[in-house]
Amino acid sequence: MKETEYFDFMTQLTITQVKEKLNADEPLSPHELSMFKEDKRKGVQQLIRRYEKEKQLKYERKQRYEEMMKFEKELYQNGFSPIAGIDEAGRGPIAGPVVAGAVIMPHEYYLEGLNDSKKLTFKKREEYFERIKRDADWGVGIVTNEEIDQINIFQATKLAMKRAVEQLSNQPEHLLIDAMELDNLSYAQTSLVKGDERSVSIAAASVMAKVTRDRMMAELATEYPMYHFHNNQGYGTKEHLSALARYGASPVHRRSFAPVKDLL
């Protein structure tokens, strides 16, 4: 097809057909993109702007992901493999368990947009949870509120992390841990402040921990609806503290934490 004929063909596509072509899995060639840019229709120009904006976002997400692979790549180069990222969810709430996730991501794996679970939307966390569960080696460690009261939240967090590592199918050679050091383990480890923003493996672990705990709190909300655990995840919100004062402590409240302890 001659270039003039091809241009006529491209400009005769409907707006819907242009949109389908832009959204297709196969990327546009530079020539096709140039053709669309020459199309004077307002609808086509809007689609092109949206296409280029998304293309730029994809590039930035890829760059961000590469930056977050820095620690893993350095460890791989030093002969460590596999590497597990570890993070927790639920240190601050006054009710429910503390949960830790441990994840070994596959080599050369790319999960676009992965970040600290707290910065992701509910929908994205759920999506990433299922993909990590399907594609990676992962484990979850849970420490109950009763155990937290017995050994304190700091030790309970460490215990949850150790339990998560024990659930992995493969034994890691190095641990990347979010702002924590674990005692009495034979594995080499690195503690990273804000690790869930700096390491892909820790970010993945944060997703597994948070989604697991949020689902547990949603289940507890059906047993103890007056505390609204499905909304506050056990944190001491105004609504939660009001219900605590009115109904007293439930079996899943942490009795060693100040608001509950003071009430008792």
Image: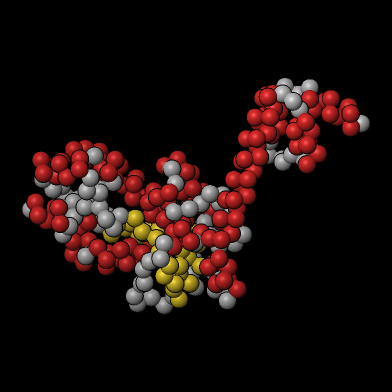
Relative to 122, is 94 on the left or the right?
Answer: left
Residue 32: percent from left, percent from top:
78, 36
Specify the quadrant of the image occupied by residue 64. Answer: bottom right
Q: Residue at x 58, y 68 (%)?
A: 73
Relative to 55, is 213 on the left or the right?
Answer: left
Specify the quadrant of the image occupied by residue 4. Answer: top right
In the displayed structure, 151 sits above or below 220; it is below
The answer to whether one can see residue 43 in this image is yes
Q: Residue at x 31, y 66 (%)?
A: 159
Toward the right, the furthest residue is 2
In the displayed structure, 34 sits above or below 117; it is above
The answer to whether one can see residue 20 in this image is no
Pick the residue in front: 216 or 71: 71
In the displayed structure, 76 sits above or below 31; it is below
Pick the residue in front: 89 or 58: 58
Q: Residue at x 89, y 32 (%)?
A: 3
Q: Residue at x 72, y 40 (%)?
A: 26
Residue 149: percent from left, percent from top:
18, 61
Residue 126: percent from left, percent from top:
44, 44
Q: Report the number of numbered marks.
A: 0
Q: Quadrant of the N terminus?
A: top right
Specify the quadrant of the image occupied by residue 53. Answer: top right
Toward the left, the furthest residue is 264
Relative to 192, is 146 on the left or the right?
Answer: left
Residue 168: percent from left, percent from top:
45, 63
Pick the residue in front: 235 or 135: 235
Relative to 15, is 111 on the left or the right?
Answer: left
